[in-house]
Amino acid sequence: MHSLIKNDRVSLLALAFLAFLTHWLANLYGVYGIFRDELYYLACADHLDWGYVDHPPLSIFILYCSRTVLGDSVTAVRLLPAVGSAILVYLTGIITKRCGGQRGAQALAALAVLSAPGYLGIHNIFSMNVFDHLFWAILLLLLLRLIEKNSAKDWIVFGIVAGLGLLNKLSVIFMLFSLALALLLTNQRRILFNRHLIIAALIALTLFAPHLIWQISHQWPTREFMHNAQQFKNVHMAAWPFLREQIINMNPFTVFLWFGGMWFVMLNKSMHRYRTFVFAYVILFILFIFQHGKPYYLYPYYPILFAFGALFLEKWRFKYAPILKTALVIGIINGALISLPLALPILQPAQFIRYADILGWRPTADENHQMGPLPQHFADMNGWEQMADKVAQVYHALPDSERNLTAVYFQNYGQAGAIDYYRDKYHLPPAICGHNNYFLWGARGCSGQILIIWGGKQQDHEQVYADVRAVGYFHHPYVMPYENDAVLYLCRHPKTSLDAVWPTVKNYN
């Protein structure tokens, strides 16, 4: 029993299980519904392919497998992200151990990941981001091994993980670029000049090739999507607001870990072999500022910085060090408890608003949208079934002769995904939409003879249809403002074919 307690892995497993339990309970008893992007990803899982306008295919294939086994309830869809959160907590401890940290340092770094509201929020929903965090963590761990021992086996594994990571999310390109450039800035550059790296690159490229072929065959839609997002959707943050978001969303108390850890690596001669990772963080930070990236793009890098900070505290020796370390742990835990209702859907909207007012907290936007009473990550969990019900009222009020000719058109993939998600329950036709991959799926067999259009401007619809009537109205107190107060239009007697109009509805952003 004593040997079991001394085992380094016990504390890590306990923290990993706590991470899983936190997300599982939040989703089991959560007060909101399914998230906007989850609706879209479920629609993508109905159209398996080697690529999509705004993401590669791996996460969608994972969702397809998960839904086949577990179903598509909110709890089922979010089970794998909860598991992924637990794995990231555990991997952070292993990274710390690889850097030389003992049991206490491993647990502290893992606790920092567990406590960060940025991770809590992202890992609570299904997206490619939770898997992206895992791929980054594994690649960082492998690079630590390669710096210590430049082995062919590790390079092969690195190539496989990099290739799969690229199939999950293209942000791995930024990580690999920053690490390669950082290696060139240090004496660790030696590991780049060997044939094993070429083999690893060929493995990664081979795994990624099907998606590249898909991009070429579809005229590079992701390039257009990224350009539009950078120019028109993402908030352009200067360096300080971007850094402030890192501090807040990684738990303000952990700044002593990751910032102190970077200084420790740079100033301590015994840590010189890890300076590559500090340089890479700075490169990524600058890159995302100039690319108008969202603050969460940098989140997957923090596990190794937490490891450095935990190692620094472990090696810090002076009279009051134990007191300060204890105070830091208490601060990190309190920071997590305070931010928990801000990150996870555990409070009713009115309760959340009161809680946020007490803290003096106001949601910030990383997209160019007006904010409502709830932050976007909660607002986008509201109103979807009510939308489907509103469409169903209009659709089922039509006579049978018209209903069989009617389709429903939406302005964005969240709305369209909601109709597809609740389609069987409300007996609705498939949704059509020009947003991202919905555009590539086309009219989905719709003739366009009669169209229910959600939102937009009546004068625009009248350019395509001779008879356009407002037949419904949607309002919800807690959705994003741009989703609210939408008018439903019933459009008859098309002036042109839907196939002729379709190229004009493309909206990649």
Image (tube, rainbow, N blue to C red):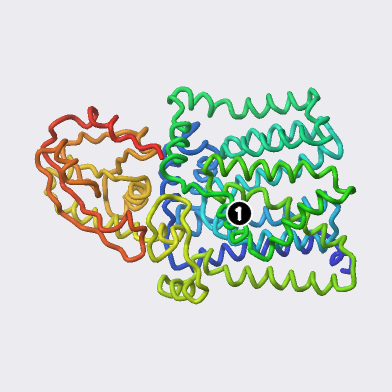
- Residue 495 is left or right of residue 383, and the answer is left
Q: Position of residue 367 (x, y in %)?
A: 44, 50
- Residue 29 is left or right of residue 335, and the answer is left
Q: Position of residue 412 (x, y in %)?
A: 34, 45
Q: Is residue 312 above or below residue 200?
A: below
Q: Position of residue 56 (x, y in %)?
A: 52, 36
Residue drawn at (59%, 29%), measured in percent from left and top?
A: 208
Q: Quadrant of residue 280?
A: top right
Q: Quadrant of residue 118?
A: bottom right
Q: Is residue 324 above or below residue 167?
A: below
Residue drawn at (27%, 62%), measured in percent from left and top?
A: 475
Viewer-closest of 270 and 98: 270
Label 1, residues with CA under 10 Å away: few <14, some 14-19, many ≥20? some
Instruction: Find numbered disc 1 in the image and state the secondary structure of the residue it sits on.
Output: helix
Could you tell me which quadrant the C terminus lies in?
A: top left
The residue beneath circle 1 is 243
Could you tell me which quadrant the N terminus lies in?
A: bottom right
Q: Position of residue 378 (x, y in %)?
A: 44, 61
- Residue 359 is left or right of residue 256, and the answer is left
